[in-house]
Amino acid sequence: MSTGRLLRTEALSWMSDVDNVTGGQSQDLVLQPVWDYLHQNHHDLLRSPLFPVVLSVTTYFFLVALYTVLDLLAPTWPFINRYRLHPDRPVTWPNIWTTLGVTIYNHLLYIFPAAVAQWLWRPPTPLPREAPTLWSFFLGILGCMVVFDFQYYLWHLLHHRVPWLYRTFHAVHHQYNQPFSLVTQYLSGWELFSVGFWATVDPILLQCHCLTTWGFMVFNVYVSTEDHCGYDFPWAMHNLVPFGLWGGTPKHDAHHQRPGTNFAPFFSHWDWLGGTHTVQNALTGRVFH
C-alpha cells in the first residue's frame, strides 16, 4: 500500500472514531441541560422524600380532571362521544362523587400518612451530578414496566382466583363494569398499597437514576389512568404499540366485562401465555385488535 493511501485510510479511520465519540457524547448530553436546570433551581424540592408522592398524586388528579371534563362534555359533544367505548352510557355525577369520595378517603387514610412517614424517617434523595443517558432513561422505564407488569399480573390473577381475596380486597374495583378515569384508584387500601409499593421499589431494584424513577412514576400513572378512561383515542398506547403487544383501554374495559380475562396492566404477553387473553367486549360484542 502506498504512503498516500495509508495516510488516507488512517485519516478516514480517525474521522470515523471522532464521529462515534461525538455521537455518543451527544446522546449522553441530551438530558444533561434539563437535569442541570432542575438540579440548580429545584434542588431542595427534588431531594425531599415527599417529592415522588406529590409528583404521582398531582399527575393523577390532573389526568383525572381532564378525563372527567371530557366525560361531562361527551353527551352533548358528538366528536368526543364517538371515541367512548360506551357512547350510550354516559358518566353521571353520582358516579363521579362516589369514586372521587373513595379516592380522597384512600389518600387521606393511606397515602398521606405514608408520605409523612417518608418525610420523617427517609433520608433526602441523593442527586447525582450526571443525568442519565437517553438510552438508559427509556430502557430503565421499560424495565420497570416489564417488572411491574409481571408483579401485578400475578397479584391480579391471584385476587380473582381466590374468592376470599377477591371479596375482601378487589371486588370494590369491579363495582363498575364500564370504567372511567376515577375508577383507576377506586380501590381497597391493600390494592393501593401493593401498587404503590411496586412502583416505588422496582426502580430501586433496577438501580435507576432518580430522573428515570420519576419518569416511570409519571408514565405509570398516565397508563393506568388511560386504561380506565373509557376512550379509544387514536393516540392511545394500544393504537401506537403494534402487533397487539399492549393491552390498553379496550382490553381492560373487556376485563371489567369478563373478570376472568386480561389481568396484565400493560402488556399482553402474560395473558397470551396464561390463556387469559380476550379481545371481545362482553356488552357490545366489539372485537379489539
Image (tube, rainbow, N blue to C red):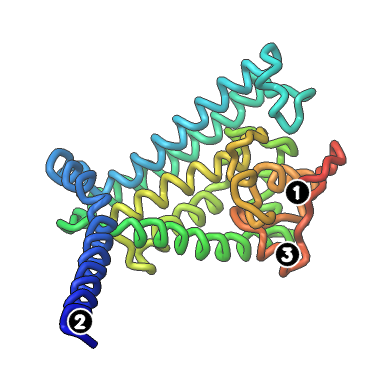
Farthest bottom residue?
1
Across and down, in percent, residue 215 comes to 38, 49
Farthest right residue?
285
Of residues 109 and 78, the one nearer the viewer is 78
Q: Secondary structure at mark 3?
A: helix
Q: How many marks?
A: 3
Looking at the rendered structure, the kind of residue marked 1 is: His
Does residue 154 appear left or right of residue 53 in this picture? right
Q: Residues within 10 Å of mark 1 (few under 14, many from 20)?
A: some
- At horizontal 42% and vertical 45% (from top left) the residue drawn is 218
Across and down, in percent, residue 178 comes to 73, 35
Does residue 213 appear left or right of residue 105 in this picture? left
Of residues 114 and 234, the one nearer the viewer is 234
Q: Which mark is residue 6?
A: 2
Q: Which mark is residue 272?
A: 3
Q: In terms of sequence position, does the residue under pointer 3 or pointer 2 come before the other?
A: 2
- At horizontal 48% and vertical 48% (from top left) the residue drawn is 220
Q: Mark 3 to mark 2: distance in Å?
A: 57 Å
Looking at the rendered structure, the kind of residue marked 2 is: Leu
* Residue 130 lies in quadrant: bottom left
Q: Mark 1 to mark 3: distance in Å?
A: 14 Å
138 above or below 65? below
Farthest top residue?
76
Q: In terms of sequence position, does the residue under pointer 1 or pointer 3 come before the other?
A: 3
The reply to whether residue 185 is visible in this rendering is no
Q: Residues within 10 Å of mark 3 (few under 14, many from 20)?
A: some
Q: Secondary structure at mark 2?
A: helix
Quadrant where the N terminus lies? bottom left
Residue at image mark 1: 289
